[in-house]
Amino acid sequence: MNDLISENSSSKILVWVERAGNRLPDPAIIFFYLILVLIAVSVLCEALGLSALHPTQLDASGNRKVEQAFSLLSADNIQRLWVEMPKTFTHFHPLGYVLVVMLGAGVAERSGLFASAIRAALANAPVYLLTPFVAVIAMLSNHAADAGYVVVIPVAAIIFAAAGRHPILGVGVGFAGVSGGFSANLAPGALDALLFGITESAYQASGIDAGWSMNIAGNWWFITALLIMYIPVIWLVADKFVEPRLGAWLPSNMADVSAYQSHDEPLSDAQRKGLQHAGLALVGVVLFWALMTLGPGTPLLNDGPGTEGAHWYTVAAPFFKSLIAAFLILFLVTGYFYGRAAGTIKSSQDMVDMMSEAMKDMGYYLVLAFFAAHFVAMFGWSNLGLITAVHGAGMIENSGLPLPIVLGMIVIFAGVLNLFVGSASAKWALLAPVLVPMLILLGVSPDGATAAYRVGDSATNIITPIMVYFPLVLVFARRWQKDFGLGSLTAMMLPYSIWMLLTGTALMMFWIMLGLPLGPGAPAEIVLPG
C-alpha cells in the first residue's frame, strides 16, 4: 500500500481541528454572533469609561483628543444602524471592487479562456523542470478563480503520471501552488481588490489620518517575491521529502482515469486560435492603458497645474486606482476574443449571460459581505477599534518585542485561525479593524498589515479540512489511488504548509526590517503626521 500515512494513524490534533471546524457555524452566522458580542462589550466598555488618546487628532486646547468608548445601544447608534443600513452595506469597499473584477473574470472563465490557457501551459512543461513549472502555473492560476482547483490539480496529476512519476505527487504540487500559494502571484488580482477593500474600510473606521489611500497594487512587489521564494520551497519539499515517501508509481495502481480524458486531450484548433486572439487582445488592452497613463496631460496622471514637485505616487494615484477597471476590461476583452474564435461566444447575449452567471456565483459573498460590513462599521461606531489599537500598540512597545517579531506572530496567528475559519475575507474583516490601526501606530503601513495577514492565511489552506476544496482534492487523489484517505492528504500537505509558513514569515520579517516598499507607492513603513 502506497499510502503516505494510513487514515487510522492520523494525528489527533488534525482530527480535533477537523471536528472543531465542522462544528463552527457558517462565517456569515459567526459575524452575526460577533455583532451581538460587540454590542454587549460596547455597553460594558462605555460603563467602565474606557478611553484612549487619539494618536493624530487634537482638541480645542491643543492636547491629544480623548476618545471614549460608545455603547452600540445608544440612541444615536441604534438610529445609525437602522437608517444607514443600505449605505453601510453598499459602501463596504470590498463589495464594489470584487463585483467589478468578477464581472470580467466571469467571461474569461466561462468562455474557456482560463482553462485553455492553463492546459496549454502545463502541456508544455519540461520534464526536468516539471515540479517548479507546475508550481508556478498553479500560483498564477489564482487569477482564474476556481479554475486553479478544478483544472490545474487534475492536469498536474496526469502530467506527472505521463513523466513516470507518482500522480499523487502532481496533486500535491498543484494543491500547494493553487491553495498554499494563494497570495503569491506576478500581478495583483481579485484577491488584492477584496483584501485591500477591507483594509480601507478598517483604516477609515479607525479615524487615524496617516495619509494612506487604497492601492490595489499595494502588495505587488511582495507577492511577486513570495512567488519566487515559494518555487524552490515547493520544489524541494515535493522532490526530496514527499516523493520518496510515496514510492514508485505503477499504472496498475490507477483506479479510474476516464474522468481525466477531457483534461488530457490536446487543445483543439479552435481553442488554440482563441488563445492567439486572446493574446493579441491582451497586448491591445495593455497598450491602451499605457496610452492613457504615459505622457503629459494623460487622464490617468495628476500632472496638471499645481502638481509640480509632487511625490510620484501622488502623480500616478489615478493609475493605481484605475487598476480595478483595468482588470475588468482585460478579462472582458480577452475572454470575448477567445470565445469568438473558439466558438464559446456566438453573440453579445452569450457574454451578458456569462456575466450574469458570475454574479449568481457571488450570491453567498453578498450575504457574507452584508454581515461583515455591519461588523466593521459597528466596530468603528463603538470606537473600540481605535481604543484597542492604541492600548495594544502601547503594550507591544512596552514589551520590547522587535517589530519584525510582532509581524511574525501575526502571520502565525492568521495561519492558526485559518484552521477554523476558511474564508480569507471573513478572517480579514474580523482582524483588520484592530490590526490595521494598531500596526499604523507601530509604524507599519496598512499595506504591510495586509501582507502579513495574507501570508498566514494562505500557507495553512492546504491542511485545513474545512476548506471548501479540500474534499475535491481528496477526490482527485482517490481517482489514482482508491485507499488514499483524509489523513494521507493532510500528512502529504503538512510539509508544504510548514515550510511555506516559515519561509513566508521570514520574508515578511526581513521585508519590514529592510524597510522595502511592498508595491509601487506602498512603503512598508508609515509615519503619522506630527
Image: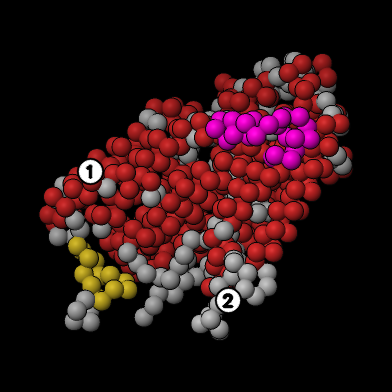
| Tag 1 residue | 82
Query: Is residue 350 within the magenta segment?
Result: yes
Quadrant of the image containing the C terminus: bottom left
Q: CA distance from mark 2 to mark 1?
A: 43 Å
Q: Main secondary structure of the magenta part?
A: helix
Question: At which x and y percent is residue 122?
Answer: 80, 38
- The amino acid at mark 2 is Asp
Query: Which of the pair 297/330 is nearer the observer?
Result: 297
Colouring of the image: secondary structure
Q: Which residues are magenta?
A: 335-357
> Of helix, strand and loop, which one carries label 2?
loop
Question: At which x and y percent is residue 56?
Answer: 32, 73
| Tag 2 residue | 303
Question: Is 265 left, or right, of 174 in this rendering?
Answer: right
Answer with the quarter of the image where residue 301 lies: bottom right
Query: Which of the pair 133/397 is nearer the observer?
Result: 133
Residue drawn at x 79%, y 43% is 277
Query: Which of the pair 497/327 is nearer the observer?
Result: 327
Contact (CB < 8 A) between labels 2 and 1? no
- The crowd level at tag 1 (other Cα within 10 Å; few <14, some 14-19, many 20+) is few
Mark closer to the chain start, 2 or 1? 1
Up/down of 400 relative to 206, above or below: below
Quadrant of the image containing the N terminus: top right
> Of helix, strand and loop, which one carries label 1?
helix
